[in-house]
Image (cartoon, grey):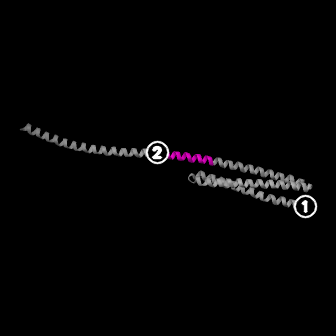
Amino acid sequence: MNNELKAMLESVIHEALLPIKEDIRSLKEDVQSLKGDVQTLKEDVQALKGDVQTLKGDVQALKGDVQTLKGDVQALQVGQSELQQLVGTIYNRQDETDARLETLTTDIKALKEDVQTLKSGQSELHQLACAIYDRQEETDARLEALTMDVHRTTGDITSLKQVQSRQEKIMGTLALRSLEQETDLRELKYA
């Protein structure tokens, strides 16, 4: 009877820990996915807004999973206390379970640190996007000023061409008059 109870208890503990391990593995995969999303955000700033919303959703999902995991851990601790009261012979098993729970807590802390790192990266990307936007506005203003300068210069060149054309006509007229006057002077000289 004692061995059956012990075997049953070990089976219950093992089954209770399997979903927790799966949740941790799933959380680690989600964190890896988030890291990939952050790298993608760095490469494609234009998609930042949509990806940030996705990241926020994933972070919320992680928070929900962490809360669920905490609930599972608390339920496991309650079950562990009941088992301890019912069967004093599985005390060593309880120590092993406590060690596993401590590992889970460490994993949860590591996941929280990863999420915080992702949030920091998100903040840096937001600042980078804002800086790019500001630079773009400055560039647009400079381009507008250059465009206005080009238009003004084009107008000045057109005006100068018109003045030069008039001056060339005047010079041509003056040259003809000068030739006429030289001819008149020669005729007067020989007359």
Which span of residues is magenta-colored? 122-143
Dividing the picture into quadrants, the one containing residue 146 is: top left
Residue at 59%, 48% in the rendered image: 126
Give percent across and percent down for residue 53: 62, 54
Q: Residue at x 61, y 46 (%)?
A: 124
For the C terminus, give its image quadrant: top left
Q: Is residue 36 shown to the viewer in this render?
A: no
Q: Is residue 48 left or right of residue 77?
A: left
Secondary structure state at the residue bearing disc 2: helix
Residue 69 image position (x, y, % from top left): 76, 55
* Image mark for residue 141: 2
Q: Which residue is drawn at the image coordinates 16% and 41% (left, top)? A: 177
As measured in the structure, the alpha-carbon distance from the residue carrying label 1 to the one carrying label 2 is: 80 Å
Where residue 2 appears, as percent x and y from the top left, is 93, 60
Q: In this rendering, would 65 be left or right of 184?
A: right
Report which quarter residue 183 is drawn in. top left
Dot 1 or dot 2: first in sequence order is: 1
Q: Which mark is residue 5?
A: 1
176 above or below 50? Answer: above
